[in-house]
Image: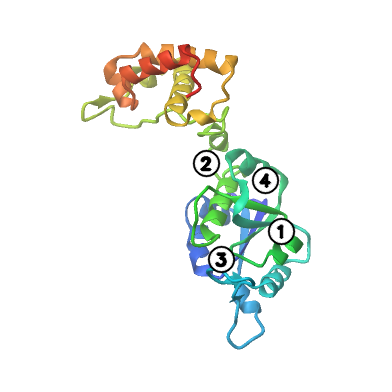
Amino acid sequence: MECWSFAMKFNFITLFPDFISPFLEEGVLGRAHKKNIIESKIVNPRDFTEDVHKTVDDKPYGGGDGMVMLSEPLERALVSITPLKHKVVYLSPQGSLWDNHKAQKWSESETQITFICGRYAGIDQRFINEYVDEEISIGNYVLSGGEVPAIVVADSMARFLPGVLGNHNSAFEESLQNNDLLEAPQFTRPDTVGDQVVPSVYRSGHHKKIQQAKEALAWVVTMKKRPELIQWNDSSKLKLKESLKIVKSWNIEELKSLGLELSEVTQMELELERGSSY
């Protein structure tokens, strides 16, 4: 078995350690642990309280719904991890939006990250002011706590660490990595499922044509599903025009297998000619 020196350490400060543990034992994160590429530590602030009730939260000043996590147990939990300076991240809807580019950047520039997983109505702002380096959000919606976002961030970062994926290049070839485009549709055996057949270009064995087809599909699929990801300028519009022409040359059965219809490809061409940015 391959053995690596630790490339990354993830610390999770959470009131629910059992929520985090299973995710660290399976899939990408589990594989990274087994190869000693990443190391993880889970710390419960409740273990750092000083009263018999192990109090970790209290009512908010000024009123309001829910309870606010106390600063002191969080501070003691953080100090217990290491005295060395490292990146402290609070998972919060007020944070900057997490994306694949940031995942790659952090995987290359950071060696240790501590995730503060809030619960209830949040955490005392004074802890954030004193200790948090960055707040991160994974989307414009509300979750019950920071555990799920913390796992999302850790998993997306781990994929960029050498040795984690079977093919290291996979992390750089997936959706949202190349030009912020979605990935082209993927197929495997058998050739035919029901009335849907794998497009002939995928089965051609001609690597240059396959790459050209997948690149064209990436543009078209992104235009169809996530047009806001496209940087609308003359260059991208030209690329889309060329891509739509390639895709439109395939037969109806192939388009169906790709999740496309001739009518919508034609409509996208018309929208592009009108100068629409969707």
Q: Residues within 10 Å of mark 1 (few under 14, many from 20)?
A: some
Kind of residue indicated by mark 4: Trp
SS label for mark 1 = loop
Q: Is residue 110 above or below residue 204?
A: below
**Mark with earlier residue (3, 4):** 4
Of circles 3 and 4, the one toward us is: 3
Of circles 1 and 2, the one toward us is: 1
Q: Please provide percent x and percent y for residue 108.
A: 69, 43
Q: How many numbered marks, from 0 up?
A: 4
How far is the residue under mark 4 from the one under mark 2?
Answer: 21 Å
For image coordinates 40% across by 29% down, the residue present is 185
Rendered image: mark on residue 121: 3
**Front-most of 39 and 85?**
85
Q: Is residue 214 above or below residue 71?
A: above
Residue where numbered disc 1 is placed: 132
In the rendered image, is residue 151 in sight? yes
How far is the residue under mark 1 from the one under mark 4?
Answer: 16 Å
Q: Please provide percent x and percent y for residue 274.
A: 47, 13
Left or right of 190: which side holds 202?
A: right
Rendered image: mark on residue 106: 4
**Mark with earlier residue (1, 4):** 4
Residue where numbered disc 2 is placed: 166
